Amino acid sequence: MLAQLAAQPAQALGVSAGWYLIPTFRLTESYDDNIFGTSTNRTSDFITRFTPGLQTGYRSEPLTVLLSGNFESDVFAKNPDLNDAVSAWHVGMSSQYLPIRPLRLNFGVDYTETESLPTLTQNLASLNLANPLNPANTVQTGRQKTTLLSVTPNATYQFTPLTSGTAAFSYTDSTFQQGATNTVYTGQLAVSHQFTQRDTGTLTYIVSSFQSNGQSFQTGGTTGPTSELSNTVTIGWAHQFSPRTTISLAGGPRFSEGSVSPAVNALATHQFRLFDWPANASLGYTYSQGFIIGEPGSVNTQSVTGSVGVQPLRALQVGLGTGWSKFTGTNTNTTSSAVQDTTTYSISLTASYQILRWLSALASYSFSYQEQNGNSSSTSTTGNIPHNVVMFGIEVAYPVRVDQ
């Protein structure tokens, strides 16, 4: 959300230039039927979570800088030994600068430290929106201390009204309490040209360096420092069938350590009315290279995502999301020679109701089912792992103009 605000000038947000302060507070009660993410002897609990936060920054036409931070406090009903005054914390910064009209500069930093898998998954989803080059993925890990740092500078130059170029860099670093450390450097160069009012083509080159060290949290197998370099070239095309329907497709070869594999990114979006309610839907597919937090080495990642959002009332928004993902790869340097092959199915329902301008009610349900196969001696992180989480809560956010 913070990155989306930074990507727009103050006029586009409907506010005048100036300094803004947004204190936030969220109180949630959730039921988690598998707090340790295991396939056997699953443990459930009711979790009360307090999340105070603060967003502040300056918005104007040439310059926007936004800072945010929050932390979480957890209280467990049946496992009080897990109570933690600071179970997670997050800080972020995003900025946009327009030194001259054709040039746009963006810079973002995002850091998360948490023991909660739902929190990590939620922050990863937000990070993917702000940083499409983010290579981090997660599987069922239970409650393990995890850190994730992302740094993302990029620049876009409008050569002509129809042609633009983008240069981007991404630095991602993750640590895991009982697993591997992963560091990825990614550079991207892209050129886009609008051929017609409805058609835009893109040529992209991406180079990535994957570095990891440590042991697999799933098998306990150890590995020394490893590194892998990959180069990817894709050609993309976006077509606007109507003002409400757009389809984009990009694909090409990825060259990595003497092997060739595909790189694909496809997305379809559509806006419509359901029973005269405003609604939107999207369907996407990706085949790319990334890493699993806590696991050494890179993996091939496939994912299919779908979502539908509906606004039955002015103050009520309801969403449905589904997903399928598969991670495959071989860690030949680990002592157990573990073969990763993890498939996850997920579904989520969300609802938010704006009671007052500064007060909202929240509700959600999420279900995931993980299947993992491989040559592994671990009994807690292999096999089939179902996970259900039901959440109800309230959120307070009160924007304040501080320079008036």
Image: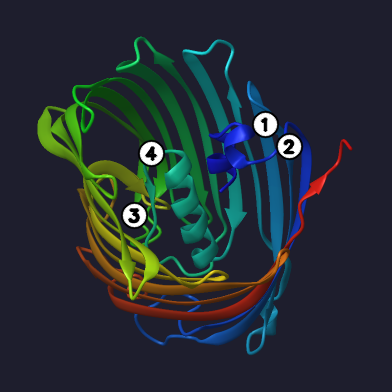
Type of residue at label 2?
A: Gly
The one nearer the camera, 28 or 357, is 357
- The disc, 3 or 2, on the residue closer to the chain's N-terminal end is 2
Residue depicted at 34% across the width and 54% down the height: 221
* CA–CA distance in space, label 3 to label 1: 44 Å
Residue beneath disc 4? 132
> Could you classify mark 1 by the number of other residues whose Cα lies within 10 Å: few (under 14), some (14-19), or many (20 or more)?
many
Badge 3 vs badge 2, beta-carbon distance below 8 Å: no
> Could you classify mark 3 by the number of other residues whose Cα lies within 10 Å: few (under 14), some (14-19), or many (20 or more)?
many
Q: Is residue 256 visible?
A: no
Badge 3 vs badge 4, beta-carbon distance below 8 Å: no
* CA–CA distance in space, label 2 to label 4: 24 Å
Residue depicted at 28% across the width and 45% down the height: 243
Residue 51, given in percent of the width and then of the height, sits at 70, 64
Q: Is residue 84 visible?
A: yes
Residue beneath disc 1? 65
Residue beneath disc 2? 57
Image quarter for residue 139? bottom left
Image quarter for residue 262? top left
- The disc, 3 or 4, on the residue closer to the chain's N-terminal end is 4
| View extreme (front): residue | 276
- The disc, 3 or 1, on the residue closer to the chain's N-terminal end is 1
* CA–CA distance in space, label 3 to label 2: 45 Å
- The disc, 1 or 2, on the residue closer to the chain's N-terminal end is 2
